Amino acid sequence: MAQQPTRNPVAPLLESLGTDHLDPGYAEAAARRRSGPPRREPSRTRRRVALVAGCLVAGLILGVAAWRTESNAPRAENTRAALLDDIQAAQERQSQLAASATSLAEQLRSSQAAAGAAGPVAEVTALENQGQLTPVTGPGLRITLDQPPAGQAQGQGRDRSVILDRDIQLLVNDLWAAGAEAIAIGGVRLNTRSAIRQAGGAILVDNRPVFWPLSVEAIGDPAAMQVKLIGGPSFGRFSSFAQLYGIEFDQTAEQSLSLPGGSAPDLLHAQPATTAAPTG
């Protein structure tokens, strides 16, 4: 019995590699793609429309934001102006009440003097003069201070604060040392217990706001005070501020200045002085 030749199992694979140039898996995927619905790519026109719509939406959002910012700015400015008007009106009212109180005090002293109490009244008047409580008039110096114009003081913040409370304190101390008999800042009379403080860009004198430009008035010998003030540290400081930052620093000698009376201090712990018994 004749033996049949044995077939090589690798031969069909070699024949497939020689005749089929595409993998069967790729062929099946291509057949499924041909049999399914055609895939539509977005057209160029649609892409352009989508891009334009996105730009319009973004522009609309930015426009609304800018409009709201601009519309809120006048409101904030109006509110700030109204608050400043209220503060100024309150300060004027307080000044009127202080003047009325001073007038009533003078009437009271006149009545006491007419009643025969001249000795005690004179002593009280002398003490009030020493405590800067009574209005005074006389020659002196007027010093005008103001912050630099907006945008001129670099690095000083939005409130343009170059002149601070400690600078005004130094100037007041130099005026006292130069021989000033009475001093007022922005119409507020200083006494031995007066405080000069700062709140933001505002200056407070005895807790009363004073506004720029600031007027510092000192009663005394104008010529002598000017000479001594030039030699003091405050004059050099304010002169440097004027050159570096453009602040206003003007001095004028006045033949007649009228300063209001100061507010009476609240005596919380005062007690009558006791006379010591003589020792023999």
Image (cartoon, helix red, strand yellow):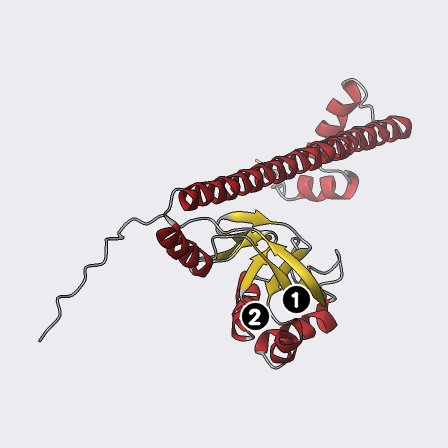
The answer to whether 32 is drawn above or below residue 129 in the figure is above
Residue at coordinates 79% horizontally, 32% vertically from top-left? Answer: 63
Residue matched to label 1: 141
Instruction: Please identify the quarter of the rendering in which residue 40 is found.
Output: top right
The answer to whether 181 is drawn above or below residue 230 in the figure is above
> Is 215 in front, or is 166?
215
User: For the residue marked with disc 2, what is the amino acid?
Assistant: Leu
Q: Is residue 250 visible?
A: no
Residue at coordinates 59% horizontally, 68% vertically from top-left? Answer: 220
Q: Which mark is residue 175?
A: 2
Q: Is residue 29 visible?
A: yes
- Circle 2 packing at 10 Å, graded few (<14), some (14-19), many (20+), is many
Image-based side of 142 in relation to 39, left or right: left
Q: Estimate the x, y position of residue 22 in percent, counting from the top left.
A: 76, 38
Q: Residue furthest left?
A: 280
Q: Estimate the x, y position of residue 163 in percent, counting from the top left.
A: 62, 63
Q: Are marks 2 and 1 in contact (CB under 8 Å)?
A: yes
Q: Estimate the x, y position of residue 266 in percent, counting from the top left.
A: 36, 48
